[in-house]
Amino acid sequence: MQRPPANTFNLEYLHEITNSLDEISKQKLKGVILTSAIPNIFSAGLDIKEFYKPDLQRLENFWSSVQDVFIKLLDLDFATAAAINGHAPAAGCVLSLSCEYRAMVNGNYKIGLNEAALGIITTPWIQAMMYQVIPMKHTETALTTAKLFDVDEALQIGLIDEIASNKEDAINRCKQYIRKFDKIPLHARALTKQRMRQTPIKILREQRDEDIRMFVDVVMNPSVQDNLKDYVEKLKNKKKK
Ligand SMILES: CC/C=C\C/C=C\C/C=C\CC/C=C/CC(=O)SCCNC(=O)CCNC(=O)[C@H](O)C(C)(C)COP(=O)(O)OP(=O)(O)OC[C@H]1O[C@@H](n2cnc3c(N)ncnc32)[C@H](O)[C@@H]1OP(=O)(O)O
């Protein structure tokens, strides 16, 4: 990912990602590694500008595009791994959860889902993605407390699989993970993966419209807009301090 300054997802970038995923799905690949070209930030999540004082039509398109990206990512036949070379809050964390394996670079980085702190409720398919990786009890506590984990904590609860010393090491660990499937029939691997992931995929496919309505309702809630206003200001003012 290379969308400075923080690899955030706006509508256009989501379309680019969808096109790339369509492209790679046609190729006979062993696996894909998601990482960031931006030092210290894997992804800062969704672009807050998309949902602060939004245009309604664009907001609906935006969430529908988020759904598209995750349906495609969860459903990829080949192995997926994330070399998390920096902060991965919110949708940055969800992106890594869509992969089968996560190596995170050691450093003063945070990963987790902090939406509740903004008054936002995570949707059922995202909750399912998290409790397929870490136990339900940890998921509930993490989501309700808007917990952002440091690297050691993330390893301890299983939110990441390994700690890497740097980006290259993280990528090498991802490659080693992908090589584990060299001798496994592709079809068997792909179907097993699909069945393991059927909960979030099924929710996403069957409840798309309801999910969009829920998202729009949450975002347009006046108290959420107030929270977002403060949050945007806080991010802007960070540099001035
Ligand atoms: C709100 C969603 C609404 C409804 C959802 C409902 C249901 C769905 C539930 C879950 C779905 C999945 C979740 C999605 C929600 C999100 O992803 S919301 C985004 C949440 N992200 C964050 O809270 C991260 C905010 N950023 C940071 O904490 C820091 O930037 C970070 C620790 C990542 C890096 O810190 P640092 O290295 O110091 O860099 P800066 O803070 O200086 O940032 C660099 C520039 O990037 C801009 N920026 C950072 N994050 C965002 C962002 N999310 N959107 C837009 N812009 C962002 C920042 O302003 C700086 O810009 P500048 O250089 O000043 O121009």
Image: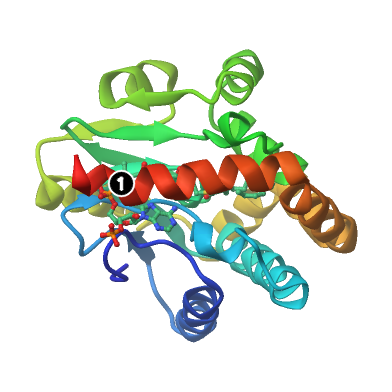
The residue tagged 1 is: 237
Residue type marked 1: Asn
Question: Hey, which quadrant is residue 80 in on the image?
Answer: bottom left
Name the residue nearer the viewer: 196 or 67. 67
State how the image is colored.
rainbow
Q: Quadrant of the C terminus?
A: top left
Question: Hey, which quadrant is residue 70 in on the image?
Answer: bottom right
| Residue 227, image x, y percentages | 59, 39
Question: Hey, which quadrant is residue 43 in on the image?
Answer: bottom left
The residue that appears at 38% across and 24% down in the rendered structure is 149
The residue that appears at 64% across and 21% down in the rendered structure is 144
Q: Is residue 232 left or right of residue 224?
A: left
Name the residue nearer the viewer: 37 or 172. 37
Q: Is residue 50 left or right of residue 28?
A: right
Q: Quadrant of the N terminus?
A: bottom left
- The answer to whether mark 1 is within 8 Å of ligand 1 is no
**Tag count in the figure?**
1
Quick check: can you spot residue 97?
no
Quick check: can you spot residue 174?
yes
| Residue 222, image x, y percentages | 75, 45
Name the residue nearer the viewer: 199 or 222. 222
| Residue 180, image x, y percentages | 34, 48
Q: Is residue 165 left or right of residue 104?
A: left
Density class for disc 1 (Cα within 10 Å; few <14, some 14-19, many ≥20) is few
The residue that appears at 37% across and 64% down in the rendered structure is 32
Give the SS element for disc 1.
helix
